[in-house]
Amino acid sequence: MAKENTEIANHEINSTVLGYFNAINKKEYIELDKILYPTDNSEYILTIAAKAQAVGMESMRLKTIYPSLVDGNIAVVGFESSVNNYINDQHVTFQQTNLFFMLKKDNHWYVAKPSDLANYDPQYLSSMIEKYDVVIKKNLSVETINKQQEFNNAGFSKIKKAANQ
């Protein structure tokens, strides 16, 4: 039963994470209000939109979602993504591995903003990240790390070269 509940939670969490990336990729930022934990999300959404515009974001792609670590109504989920930007007349791609905290409310999983986690003990959140490190290590290959670093170094070199011209 616990394994089945974990699989259901993973499916729901994956759907939410995918919705987050789809909304940003399509620049339909208002859709994030349905994906972020239900509090006042307007300032956070405006910040995301402003950052995307500031870095010339053209698209954001979700590459991989790792299995989540669920503890009641909170979870940690890791993912690999790439962001294509247009900076200084250059198309630049950056790749990253990152994680979200997820919160469950009314039987639905949401992406948690930092302010949504304010009532959680920081040591508890840190211990969840430490436990999740095992999942990251199991799923993140050295090849992926090297590829991300190569993409990111090339991107920074393009930006630097364009800025110096």
Image (spheres, rainbow, N blue to C red):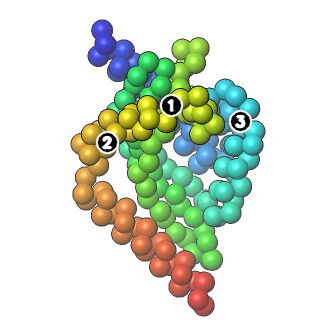
Indicate the secondary structure of the residue bearing disc 1: loop
Q: Determine crowd level at label 2: few under 14, some 14-19, many 20+ residues with C-alpha closer than 10 A.
A: few
Is there a contact, CB below 8 Å, between mark 2 and mark 1?
no
Q: Marks 2 and 1, Cα distance to the nearest angstrom?
A: 19 Å
Residue 35 coordinates in the image, percent (x, y) = 61, 31
Q: Residue at x 69, y 43 (%)?
A: 44
Q: Determine crowd level at label 1: few under 14, some 14-19, many 20+ residues with C-alpha closer than 10 A.
A: few
Q: Nearer the viewer, mark 2 or mark 3?
A: 2
* Amino acid identity at mark 1: Asp
Q: Determine crowd level at label 3: few under 14, some 14-19, many 20+ residues with C-alpha closer than 10 A.
A: some
Q: Marks 3 and 1, Cα distance to the nearest angstrom?
A: 22 Å
Residue 121 has which mark?
1
Which residue is labeled 2 in the image? 133
Q: Quadrant of the C terminus?
A: bottom right
Indicate the secondary structure of the residue bearing disc 2: helix
State whether residue 37 is above or below residue 161.
above
Residue 41 has which mark?
3
Does residue 15 appear anywhere in the picture? no
Residue 139 coordinates in the image, percent (x, y) = 27, 44
State whether residue 16 is above or below residue 57.
above
Q: Is residue 113 left or right of residue 64?
A: right
Q: Earlier in the sequence, mark 3 or mark 1?
A: 3
Q: Residue at x 66, y 49 (%)?
A: 48
